[in-house]
Amino acid sequence: MKIAIIGCGKQAPKHIGGLRSSRGVEVVLVDADPALAQALAEETGVEWVETVQEVLDDPGVVAIDICTPVTSHVELIEAGLAAGKDFFCEKPLCSTSAEAREIQAQLEGSGRIGMVGFNYRFAPAMAECKRVLSGVAETGLSPVLGKITSALLRVGGRGGHQLWKHQKAEGGGAINEMLIHLVDLSNWFFGPIEHAHSFVEELLRPERPISGQLEKVDAEDFVLVRLTSRSGIESFCQADLITPSFMHYIDIQGENGTFFGSIQPDMPSFLFCVEAAGGYDQGRTDFDFGHRNFFQAQMTTFVDALHDRVQPDGCGVEDSVNLLDAFEQIRAESPGS
């Protein structure tokens, strides 16, 4: 099985590692700058070609793995589907919910597999939290925490060291780069988002060091939003591109306790129960997940879906439709809009 990675920037090496560790996968690289594809291919020992069209015309390539700026995603997905290719696409799927619905319609009638890259779901602490919150999306009640009373999700860092990730015209900024992971987790934990409201959306650092030099940027670097799910759960999400060292955590409070966790292996993840419930003991339970490669788990899920010819459980196009609906509400209700 041959899979073509389109785009040889920061994410590509992670995709190469994840795909090569999966069963029966060969990788081929392509980039708008052939020199980048060649250099990464020689570094990692995989094949490369000069143009996307070569990938689309190759019957041996069964799927494309899109690691390019969001503004190119729709064109590449549509070209891939027209050529009979399955696809994996880095987040966000596209720029608008209308585009997402169009991709969803094309995918449903094609018989192809499509998956979107929300790798936080595959982090062990997030998977554990999903188990603790089993049924919340439907009822608003957790078998462990009981009624959910509050949820705080936070992520911060400097973002990718690529200028386009800090430019509005290229789809950059804290919303697409960071907040998107938190909105996806909220959607996954608590069910489809009914309403999204932006409290703060700011550009705090119009100049910042990127790849060793000071650059002028125009995309937002701090955002705080409130999400309300159809199940009635409210979650508050804070994301930024100014935290010096990457930081992520979730803090879920219920009438019977607390779940605190992070995708970072050096951050604590624990559950506290007022009373024993759902197979968990009374008091504090600390989790030691070790250094698991959740990015690899994500790519293995995609490859398994290709082998089994079934849409992967979660991380599909349908979730991106709901997420982009929420994003459009956030931008429309931004204090600066």
Image: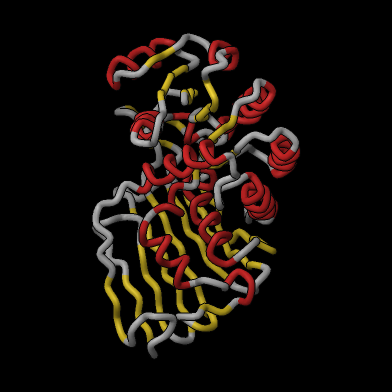
Question: Looking at the image, which is closer to me, 230 or 295?
Answer: 295
Q: Residue at x 52, y 54 (%)?
A: 223
Q: Is residue 46 left or right of residue 54?
A: left
Question: Looking at the image, which is closer to me, 42 or 226?
Answer: 42
On screen, residue 146 above or below 193 = below
Q: Residue at x 37, y 84 (%)?
A: 273
How many circles with numbers are drawn on the protein? 0
Q: Is residue 5 left or right of residue 246?
A: right
Q: Is residue 283 left or right of residue 98?
A: left
Q: Position of residue 307 (x, y in %)?
A: 51, 37
Report whether residue 327 is seen: no
Q: Residue at x 70, y 44 (%)?
A: 97
Q: Residue at x 63, y 29 (%)?
A: 77
Question: Colour scheme used in the picture?
Answer: secondary structure
Q: Position of residue 140 (x, y in %)?
A: 60, 76
Q: Is residue 276 left or right of residue 183?
A: left
Q: Position of residue 69 (x, y in %)?
A: 53, 30
Report whether residue 256 is seen: yes
Seen as rendered, the residue at the extreme bottom is: 275
On screen, residue 92 above or below 184 = above
Q: Position of residue 330 (x, y in %)?
A: 64, 54
